[in-house]
Image (spheres, rainbow, N blue to C red):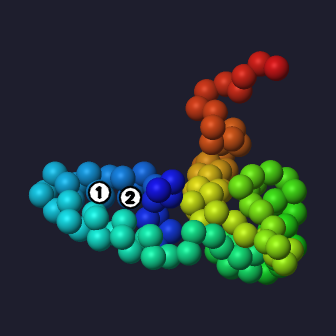
Amino acid sequence: MGTSPVHALLISTRDYEELTAVLAKAGRSDLAKKLTEAERSDAETMTTPEVAALFGVSSANTIKNWVNGGWFPGAFKTAGGHWRFPRAEVYASLDRLKQLRAKNEGGDLMPPDFDEEPPLL
């Protein structure tokens, strides 16, 4: 499966991986398996209003604008014309946004992908 149980737990992918490693080391791989099984029962996509609520924006149009800006490249329209967003992609974008906010609050205006100098173009 291409997604992790991050969405069901509302934790980052990195934290989820660390949690499952700790559980496995403690001999509790059964608990990690239960987390994975719980995630499988969740829907794999989110609706525009769900994504808007998660990001704390009041308008679904904001999310649609973000789609046009490339934030959710895996987003697709249903046969009825409604947008659907891969849950893992939404949470990955949320993690990136949180990283960017944290860097900006610290006075570091460099995008999170650049630890040092930006590449020369």
Q: For this view, does 81 lie left or right of residue 46?
A: right
Q: Position of residue 14 (x, y in %)?
A: 42, 51
Is 106 drawn above or below residue 53 in the view shown?
Answer: above
Residue at the far top in the pictured view: 120
Count of residue discs = 2
The reply, left or right, for residue 101 in relation to residue 66 is left
Q: Position of residue 89 (x, y in %)?
A: 62, 57
Circle 1 SS class: helix
Amino acid type assigned to the residue bearing label 1 in the image: Thr
* 7 displayed left or right of 97: left
Please report the residue visible at 12 percent of the width from the left and 58 percent of the height from the top. Answer: 27
Q: CA distance from mark 2 to mark 1?
A: 6 Å
x, y (%) of residue 13?
Answer: 46, 55
Circle 2 Cα neighbour tier, 10 Å, few/some/many (<14 / 14–19 / ≥20): some
Residue type marked 2:
Tyr
Image location (x, y in percent) of residue 74: 71, 55
Q: Which residue is mark 1?
A: 20
Judging depth in this view, the residue of 46 and 37 nearest the camera is: 37
Q: SS at mark 2? A: helix
Q: Which residue appears at 28% of the width and 64% of the height?
A: 33
Q: Considering only vertical position in the picture, is 81 above or below 90?
A: below
Q: Residue 16 — which label? A: 2
In this view of the protein, which residue sits in the foreground, 14 or 76?
Answer: 76
Q: Quadrant of residue 121?
A: top right
Q: Nearer the viewer, residue 72 or 56?
A: 72
Q: Do labels 2 and 1 touch, CB within 8 Å?
A: yes
